Amino acid sequence: MIEHIELFFKSIFIDNMVFAVFLGMCSYLAVSKKVATAVGLGAAVIFVLAITVPLNWLLDQYLLQPGALVWLGPEFAEYDLSFLSFIMFIATIATMVQLVEIVVEKFSPSLYNSLGIFLPLIAVNCAILGGSLFMQAREIETLGLAVNYGISSGIGWFLAILAIAAIREKIRYSNVPAPLRGLGITFIVTGLMGIGFLSFGGMLTGGDEEVKEAPKEVISETTELEAEVDNQIKIVN
């Protein structure tokens, strides 16, 4: 349970897709002019990540990893299909994005029109593919953790685009210097927000006691060495 909680908060605040690794910046900058549009795209990203990360985890565990095909028989144990990871992950993502596009167009035509080309472009959004690749690189152990990671990564991206959209709506009525209007001030605000999110890095730091104990051992070893050297000098004298 603690592992799930730690992964959830770490994915939202510490390893935020936008502020930590700067993924999905194209949609983040283009669709963050209005809060309503940002909420719609953020919800779509959460849904796509929540579905694709677990599905790609299953593909990775039972199809792509070296020896993953052993469930078909011992003769398949040596097969390695990891070179197909990108193709399989992108195919899964494209399928889910197409489903989201159909649902949004059916039930919310206004949101579909406001999102425009950026809704189908979720399929090539690096944050979506990054979620699956990070899941694979970090060797997430269970399907439950993969679901947790997909949802929490999506929430982190959602919070980022929602925050910048709210700020940009307020900045519209502010006296911003002409050279910084538009994307200029947006980049500056994004950088400041990224610095702010870095402060969450101290939430889940572990092993501080071990780090503090290590120098004591080194000091004790050096003092013993010095004592031996002193004894040898006294013997010689």
Image (tube, grey):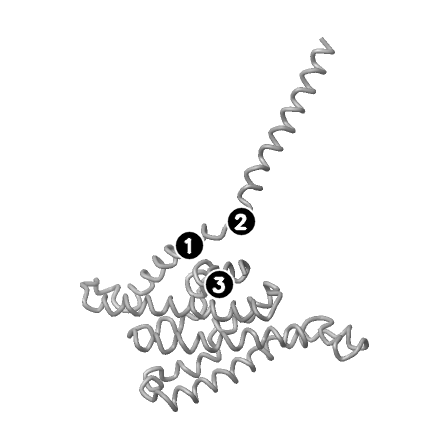
Do the residues bearing badges 2 and 1 touch, measured as CB atoms within 8 Å?
no
Q: Which mark is residue 198?
A: 1
Q: Does 77 appear above or below 180?
A: below
Which one is in front in this view, the residue at disc 2 or the one at disc 1? 2
Is residue 141 shown left or right of residue 27?
Answer: right
Few, some or many C-alpha atoms within 10 Å of disc 2 (few <14, some 14-19, many ≥20)?
Answer: few
Q: Earlier in the sequence, mark 2 or mark 3?
A: 3
Q: Mark 3 sits on what residue?
A: 8
Quarter of the figure with residue 137: bottom right
SS for tag 2? loop
What is the C-alpha distance between the residues marked 2 and 1? Answer: 16 Å
Image x and y of residue 81, in percent: 69, 75
What is the C-alpha distance between the residues marked 3 and 1? Answer: 16 Å
**Identity of the amino acid at label 1?**
Leu
**Identity of the amino acid at label 3?**
Phe
Q: Does 75 appear above or below 183?
A: below
Q: Mark 2 sits on what residue?
A: 206
- Residue at image position (36%, 69%) is 161
Few, some or many C-alpha atoms within 10 Å of disc 1 (few <14, some 14-19, many ≥20)?
Answer: some
Few, some or many C-alpha atoms within 10 Å of disc 3 (few <14, some 14-19, many ≥20)?
Answer: many
